[in-house]
Image: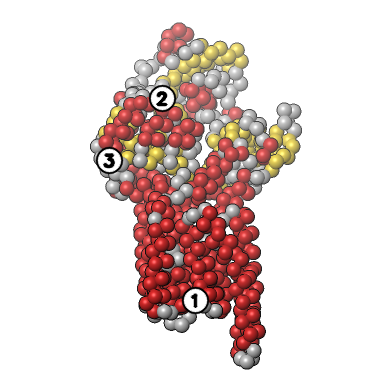
Amino acid sequence: MSAPMLTSAEQRSAARQLTLAMLALGLLVLGLVWRWLAPDQGGVSQLLLGVASLLVAVPVMRSAWYSLRFPSLHGITDQLIALAMLGAWATGDLLTAALLPIIMIFGHVLEERSVIGSQEAIHALGKLTRSHARLVQADGGIVEVDNGTLNTGDVVEVRAGDRVPADGVVLSGQASLDTAPITGESVPLEASVGVQVFGGAINLDGVLRLEVTRTGNESTLGKVIALMQNAERSKPPITRLLERYAGSYMVLVLLLAAVTWFVTNDAQAMLAVLVAACPCALVLSAPATAIAGIAVAARHGILIRSSAFLEELADLTSLVVDKTGTLTFGTLRLQSLETAAPDRQTVLNLAASLGSASSHPVSRALAVLATQEHRLALTDIRERQGLGVVAQTDQGEAALGRPELFEQLGIVTTAVPIHDGPIAGLALNGQFLAWLLLADSVKPEARQALQELRDLGLGRQLLLTGDRQSVADSLALEVGISDVEAQALPEDKLNRVLGEIGSGFRPMVVGDGINDSLALKAGVVGVAMGAGGADIALASADVVLIGSDLRRLGTCVRLSRQCRQTLQVNVIIGLGWTLAIVVFAAFGWLGAAGAMIAAVLHNLSTLLVLGNAGRLLRFQEPLLKLED
């Protein structure tokens, strides 16, 4: 009766129990009124109370029998209430036999209604995965379909006000997207050509055409739901510890109740001990806290696979972080333009036009420098393998590529700039125009995020990358990391992480690529970048940052420590309150209606635990702003 999470079948069972409890309560009130109005007709009053007790006996005994077949912590409560009810019957106290289970059933209903709402959150997320989509057909026509029928590679149109039907990449158009349900970001995402978008986001303005990349359970939102469901079913370490001693606890309670009966010869005191010893508050202290923490994390765009990792985050002492795709965007971007041409935009438009004619990573990076309408018309396109692209324009022959390309074409260039990254030159009609310097740029929040982690106690930070030493050193200096290991293979990363653990550190490992998967699995907590992260990295990680905002790493640690404090308070409430009620019950200090008073106090402690866990839902990060 007291399970913290309910399936649909269990919800129907709880509704039936509540109905029976309300009927029994009506009969009980009628019986008491009859006893008051007609004290000489005690038999009728007893009959009404007996029927009331029989009504609520059915769910109580069924739950107790189920808990004997399938032992659990929650089952102890069911067994103790059943024993207390049998004891009340045996002593002829039909009022207690009826009122006691009624109080407990109403208490359990309050528990289930108070528990954080994780089922409702998952249900709400599930609704986001079901929507209509405007599928663009081969002939250009548009037909509205259920998004569940979409396949990878389909092209869909998303109008203003529509929900993005699946994960995809923008083919054309520009719009602002509300991604708060998925990433937790309050600032809209500006979507343009080449940008990856998440299913479930809402198009605030503009019209987009997307190529679908992931659908259904493979989409980001589908994985969010799966992770929440897995986290909900997981058991925190303290819960597993309590389960280990559940049998011994039951024996101890029965012995204490027997001693109370033997010493006081007071049936109410004995029944009160059985009721007071119900460990609901203590049992719910850990899962209620964990569910609240996981729900808050999901609201901030953080997916935690298990409550065990939520606890581990509080004790981290070091950071091992990847470079490409983690501290950097993982894609080439134009870093600087060296040109003597007066109109820089004309140079960029020409570079984008030539870049769109090639699939080389450098060309793709330059292709986004201008929209389709600003690109030049090209004819006679010739791609020089490994060198660049040459094509005809209205103004003559244009060339984009490595310095060696211009040597072959006989075009005199300016001095090649010193740059630790790709360089592309641009020429038009035999005249050299510009050098375009590209690099994988650092995420603007990287330095701030790493400083926050140092402030939180993760002072030992290691940059572990497969990139060149010079590139790694330059980036480490920019973000404030002093320990660098470059040109690291996957097994090198794994060994370094194991070495950190062997040295007594508890590392958080952050990465996004296939080569990070071994290290992510080996770390105390592995964190993967959700946006653009490799599937194997996401599968190996314990925590996923959906929006890939590095400042959420600090959120993880702060939330974990807040959860630990809440859990400690909950355990004190659950254990201390239970012990206090048991002592009061054993000494008969709860009075003649000891069992019923114990039931009320028991439910009050449970609600205190749930209320304290619910305070976590108010956890808010300060507005995330980039440092100047």
Residue 618: horizontal and vertical position, in percent?
Answer: 45, 60
Classify 125 as above or below 23: above
Residue holding disc 2: 437
Which residue corresponds to the image point at 44% horizontal and 18% vertical from the top-left?
425
* Amino acid at the residue labelled 2: Leu
Whether residue 529 sits left or right of residue 449 in the image: it is: right
**Mark toward the viewer: 1 or 3:** 1
Seen from the viewer's position, the closer of residues 65 and 404 is 65
Please tell me whether mark 2 sits on a helix, a strand or a loop.
Answer: strand
Residue linked to disc 3: 505
Category of crowding for the residue at label 1, using alpha-carbon neighbours closer than 10 angstroms: few (below 14), some (14–19), many (at least 20): many
Given the image, on which type of amino acid does mark 1 rest?
Answer: Met
Image depth: mark 2 or mark 3 in front = 3
What's the residue type where badge 3 is placed?
Answer: Phe
What coloring was used for the rendering? Answer: secondary structure
The residue nearer to you, when weighing 329 against 426, is: 329
Q: Which of labels 2 and 1 is toward the front?
A: 1
N-term-proximal mark, 1 vs 3: 3
Q: Are marks 2 and 3 in contact (CB under 8 Å)?
A: no
Q: Are marks 1 and 3 in contact (CB under 8 Å)?
A: no
Q: Name the residue under label 1.
A: 596
Of marks 2 and 1, which one's residue comes earlier in the chain?
2
- Residue 589 visible in the current orientation: yes
Q: How crowded is mark 3: few (under 14 residues within 10 Å), some or many (20 or more)?
A: some
Taking the spot 72% from the left edge, 28% from the top edge, the residue there is: 138
* Mark 1 vs mark 3, CA separation in Å: 52 Å
User: Residue visible at 51% across and 11% down?
Assistant: 384
Furthest residue to the left? 503
* Relative side of 317 to 239, left or right: left
